[in-house]
Image (cartoon, rainbow, N blue to C red):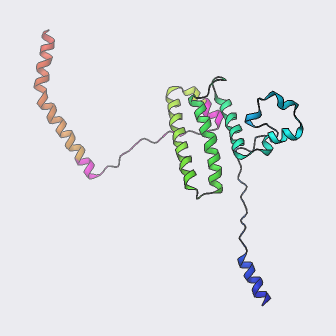
Amino acid sequence: CSSVLQTARGYAKPVRRKRKDIPSHLDDLPPTMLKKDYANVPIVASVDDVVKRLLSLEMASQREKVKVKTQQLVEKVRRSPNDSGSFEVQVAILTARIRTLEEHLQRHPKDKSNRRQMLMAVDRRRKLLSYLRRVRYSTFENTCKQLDIQYSPPLAYRRRVTKRWAVKKAFCIKVFQEKQKLLAPERLKQRREWRAR
């Protein structure tokens, strides 16, 4: 009887899955670095080691680490110290958010809400980058290089040609040509009047 119970207990044990060690984009942050809110406070230099440890990234939450990482990315691409809303800065903020959501989705692949947020952020970043590419190409190249982004331009739109679409287009062209023939004598008359003046 005891061997049956042991077998049943073996089936009843929860399955412990090994957590994959997914590399994070926050791994390069040093743990002794101060949190974003306390980085510029002058009193921190004279504080005890225990307090410094509490205010450092070693004891920080994921959100606070993402804030620091976002600030680092923004510092790489900003134009001036007061720049907080240029296209480059917006791309840097979106890049930090996208990388955080990518890591989350690797651990939780069925999280549809965050997948949707990530896809929306990727789309927004692509629009900002395509604008930068059109307007200021050197800035676009520098931003992609600094943030380690590989930009691929969107594919040219191609409509699938169906029989119905082809017939409709041919009909529209025919109507346009007939209209031009009807307006031709009137246009000729207007040209002669302009030349006469």
Magenta-highlighted residues: 142-167
Q: Is residue 127 left or right of residue 29?
A: left
**Residue 91: percent from left, percent from top:** 58, 35
Which quadrant would residue 147 be assigned to in this image?
Answer: top right
Quadrant in which the N terminus is drawn: bottom right
Quadrant in which the C terminus is drawn: top left
**Residue 159: percent from left, percent from top:** 35, 46
Depicted 28 relative to depicted 41: above or below = below
Identity of the residue furthest to the bottom in this view? 1
For the point 64% across and 27% down, which residue is it?
Answer: 78
Q: Is residue 2 left or right of residue 178?
A: right
Depicted 25 relative to depicted 138: above or below = below
For the point 80% across and 44% down, which residue is it?
Answer: 58
**Residue 16: percent from left, percent from top:** 73, 67
Please state which of residues 171 and 81 is positioned toward the viewer in this rendering.
81
For the point 15% across and 12% down, which residue is it?
Answer: 195
Please state which of residues 186 and 21 is positioned toward the viewer in this rendering.
21
**Residue 130: percent from left, percent from top:** 50, 34
Please state which of residues 135 and 38 is positioned toward the viewer in this rendering.
38
Which quadrant would residue 125 be assigned to in this image?
Answer: top right
- Residue 161 painted magenta: yes
